[in-house]
Image (cartoon, helix red, strand yellow):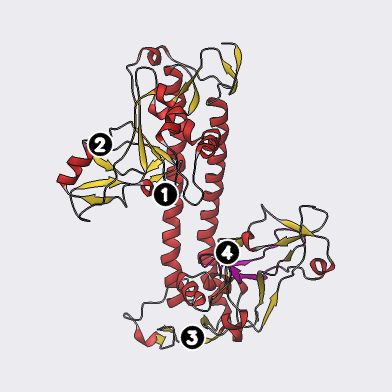
Amino acid sequence: MNKLIPTKFGFLPEDWRIKSLAGCTTKIQDGTHFSPRTTEGPFLYVTSKNIRPGRLDLSTAGCISEEEHRSIYSRCDVKPGDVLLTKDGANTGNACLNTEDQQFSLLSSVAVLRADHAENVGGFILQYLMSPSGQKRLKDLMSGNAIPRLTLQKIKAFELPVPPRPQQCRIAEILSTVDEVIEQTEALIGKYQQIKVGLMHDLFTRGVTPDGQLRPTHAEAPHLYQTSPLGWIPKKWKIKPLLHFVPIAVYGISVSMDDDPSGVPVMRMNNIFQGRINVSDIKFSETSDARSLTLRYDDVLFNRTNSLEHVGKTAIWRGELPAASFASYLVRLDVDTQMMRPLFLVYWLNLPITQLIIRQFATPGVHQVNINPTNLRRINCAAPIDLSEQDRITSRIEALDVTRRSHDEHLAKLRQQKQGLMHDLLTGRVRVPIQESDRSSPPQS
């Protein structure tokens, strides 16, 4: 094993070198300033918004004519294996590897980095740029306050520790394999989310019969439905202002909080996530208010103040901690359990259509918007009279949520594994085995 030697990047194996990006590449160039004359055409152009962390997304790329493409591409060509790095805008620092065979043009907000291939690998350069260390150092090089920016000069001068090429290939292969599994898991989660959206629409407009089946649609069986301000709903449902189902709304506490775990945990708006309570980031309070206003199993928490994107989100408390209170930006909705299951309310409030209705009552503040619980409880809510049907509806959604959460947990473990591998492999702390075939293999990007 090679001995370790001290460097500006800590101790590295003696066969590693510190190189600038200019020293690892044959090309570092940004795209072209241009305004497309048309939104139609056979060729694509890529901007910073198309560069996701580690992935090129052409689904929202713009279109240009063949004439425009020839003019732009001749000034900055892009080839498979090139690293694309955003240098302007909100996504500055995002990087990905171009794996597309089709030609596309680059706007000036993106730079292309082409490894010299004889000694360096684009995939390794990408992995280092996307590592926590690489991202931190890129951020330190950015200029601009509202709009961050990387200059080509700073990109070229960016330094990184580089092992011999066979090790670069193996490291890039290992980390990209994990990336592929992460991407597949993300796609699966996205698929479950789409299924859930469609299922919830059907469940909250058609309901579930005692045999566990969705009712036929209104078009198939109009005699099963009644008209309402919310459209067609099953005849065995009732529609009332939310106040009918939620007679009491309780504001959270306005107290000082800190990180001292000897106090009472206080749930805040950032603890509401996908209809459940996330206790990974909590604050505490020693006040008497926090000890007197505690959460009960099945309590419903409504986020009354936040950005327009997050205001109105709702979650159910399932005893995630032995005791906890909640902050003033949240409201506890006390459900009349003789008429509605708390979990039914949570799922109904988180419906996309309900969220749109709720936000119509949002009043602007200095930095956030607010939804008054009194106004909230004026909106109409349709629910089955039979509580057992409400249970059937929520159990169908919960089953999907359980599967979704298992995939979320798997994704979190994969990302944690990737972080650990990056730390070990990109610093030489763990040496990767190299086969003789790898040592003699022709250069690859």
Image-based side of 311 in relation to 294, left or right = left
What are the residue bounds of the magenta stretch? Answer: 297-323
Label 2 sits on what residue type?
Answer: Asp
Asked where in the image residue 296 lies, by quadrant, the reply is bottom right
Please tell me which residue is depicted at 53% across the width and 83% down the height of the picture: 379
Give percent across and percent down for residue 346.
57, 70
Give percent across and percent down for residue 32.
29, 42
Prevailing secondary structure of the magenta residues? loop
Image-based side of 301 in relation to 163, left or right = right
Please say if 34 is above or below 211: above
Q: Which residue is under mark 2?
A: 101
Q: Which of the pair 431/252 is nearer the observer?
A: 252
Label 1 sits on what residue type?
Answer: Ala
Q: Is residue 347 magenta?
A: no
Please say if 92 is above or below 361: above
The numbered mark at residue 236 is 3
Give percent across and percent down for residue 125.
43, 29
* SS for callout 3: loop
Q: Which residue is under mark 1?
A: 187
Cβ atoms under marks 1 and 4 closer than 8 Å: no
* SS for callout 2: loop
